[in-house]
Amino acid sequence: MVGGEGPADPRWMVKGTWIDYAKTFKAFCINLEHRYYGESHPTNDLSVKNLQYLSSSQALADLANFITAMNDKLKLNKEVKWVAFGGSYPGSLAAWLRMKYPHLVFAAVSSSGPLLAKVNFMEYFEVVVNALREKTGGEECVNQLRLGHKQIEDMMKTEPDAIEKEFRVCKPFVRATKNDLRNFFNSIADDFADLVQYNEDNRISSDTKYRNITINTVCKMLTEPGESPAYKRLAAFNSIMLDKANQTCMDYSYNNMINDLRNITWGSEGARQWMYQTCTEFGFYQTSSGEVEVFGDHFSLDFFIQQCQDVFGTKFNENFVDSMADWTNSYYGGLGISVSRVVFVHGSVDPWHALGLTTTEDNDAPAIFIHGTAHCANMYPASENDPAELTEARLEIQQYIGTWLGQP
């Protein structure tokens, strides 16, 4: 199991579909944490100078070094085959590991991996909006979301105190800067990003108290009959998300966010480290440019590029970020990746599928596209509520692994 932008979670050593596969194929399981995340601290602090050693290519070299060392330590012979698993960014790493180190890694399962580095990832919120349509079977939910945002924009000019109260903001809008307000709107949109990205996933780490917060339940809140205006319904959802995050008020302060990200001491969250990787390798900025009508045009690309510069320095401008994303695509191949014995898995509700392989271009590197499922859904433990297509996808992945291992 390839680690990613967070601590290695021991629960993955006893749960998850890869454990089921391991039992089937009598495999040995190892979970390796990614450098700079969790407890893996290779430097004294997270200064920009020290972050130069944080990259996907360095992470792949760590994996290669680890595999070689484990082969020696455990005296594994050439018949023992390594299969890499990963979801999201580690899903990309699993595929790239097989491509860059084919002599060490025999096969890989790449789940929800964004293979294409893209700075202005405007498609993200386009998929979010389409997912609301797909899961509810119509336009009503999207229309209410659009109306709610329009009401918020209008009332912030005429009755800002009403919006302050409903959205439980930490400071009044009269003291807000332009970037504060952009952050406010970005935060509201991010609630829907989180809702859609993990919709109905049987997550190992998810809080059961909030398990019923799904596209369908939230859209019901937005569309059920009643006198409550659309903005108040959006605010009610925002309150649920604040409570879920144990936040008493909505802190939309841009400076507070930047100051948190400027902290160079080791912490457990990994937000500074991941932001560095987006500024130096991937972009992945979920801008409002693709769905201006629904979410407003408040968090365009320049908002995110400014964050790179405010956190890491002026050299991290748009030209720099663009050139680094281009280099990443050149190094790995983007969606033109040339690799064998990798299965690429995506869900139609997951916004990250827009940057991944969803159709089979090469029978040696098949793609499975699961309609109706979200981010990394195939990796989580099976549930009796799983749609048939998800159950079939898990079996299909197992068949690919078995065929490649010669154990169908």
Image (spheres, rainbow, N blue to C red):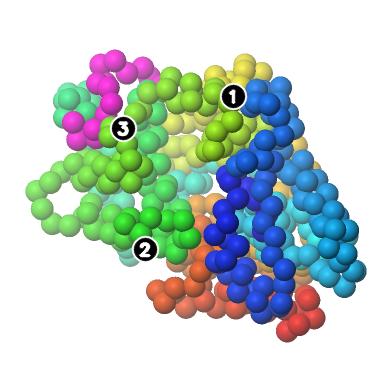
* Residue 135, label in figure: 2
Give the magenta range: 165-179
Residue 134 image offset from top left, x and y in percent: 39, 62
Mark 2, Cα crowd under 10 Å, few <14 / some 14-19 / many 20+, is some
Task: Name, please, the residue furthest toward the right.
Answer: 78
Q: Residue at x 80, y 52 (%)?
A: 66
Q: Which mark is residue 363?
A: none
Q: Which residue is the site of mark 3? A: 250
Q: Is residue 316 magenta?
A: no
- Please tell me which residue lies in front, 357 or 211: 211
Mark nearer the viewer, 1 or 2: 1
Residue at x 70% of width, y 60% of height: 30
In the image, is 58 to the left or to the right of 215? Answer: right
Instruction: Mark 1: give few (<14), some (14-19) or many (20+) Cα within 10 Å.
Output: some
**Left of 363 or right of it: where is 163?**
left
* Mark before the other along the chain sequence, 2 or 3: 2
